[in-house]
Image (spheres, grey):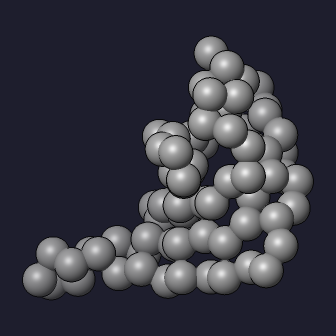
Amino acid sequence: MKFIELTLGSYIISHGYDNKNKEALQHVYSETFSKKIVPVSRIKSVSEKYILTDYVDGRWIYWEYEENFEDVKKMLG
């Protein structure tokens, strides 16, 4: 399994959708960033601010990351 090292901070957990099709989100704020090893197989998408990964029990998690977007693209390429 391939991994990349990222510096991650605050995140948003998507718990799914309610009966009105509104996404149920939980915001978790962090004052600092910390290095984490992330399995590439769990990454669903990358934007300039967030990296979206699988989480437990079918949830998704949007992580803020400190690296440059172009550098993350190169790591995944």
Q: Residue furthest right?
A: 35
Question: Is 56 situated left or right of 38 in this image?
Answer: left
Tell me residue 77's x, y (percent): 62, 15
Tell me residue 43's x, y (percent): 57, 40
Q: Nearer the viewer, residue 36 or 64?
A: 64
Q: Nearer the viewer, residue 69 or 5?
A: 69
Q: Residue at left 63%, top 60%?
A: 64
Residue 43, can we see it? yes
Tell me residue 21's x, y (percent): 15, 75
Q: Residue furthest left?
A: 20
Relative height, residue 14 to residue 68 (above, below):
below
> In which quadrant of the rendered image does the N terminus lie?
top right
Tell me residue 52's x, y (percent): 52, 51
Question: Is 24 situated left or right of 76 in this image?
Answer: left
Relative height, residue 49 to residue 5 (above, below):
below
- Could you tell me how many numbered marks the image carries? 0
Relative height, residue 55 to residue 11 (above, below):
above
Q: Residue at left 34%, top 72%?
A: 16
Q: Residue furthest top?
A: 77
Q: Residue at left 82%, top 65%?
A: 33
Q: Nearer the viewer, residue 46 or 18?
A: 46
Q: Residue at left 79%, top 80%?
A: 31
Question: Is 54 situated left or right of 29 in this image?
Answer: left
Residue 54, can we see it? no
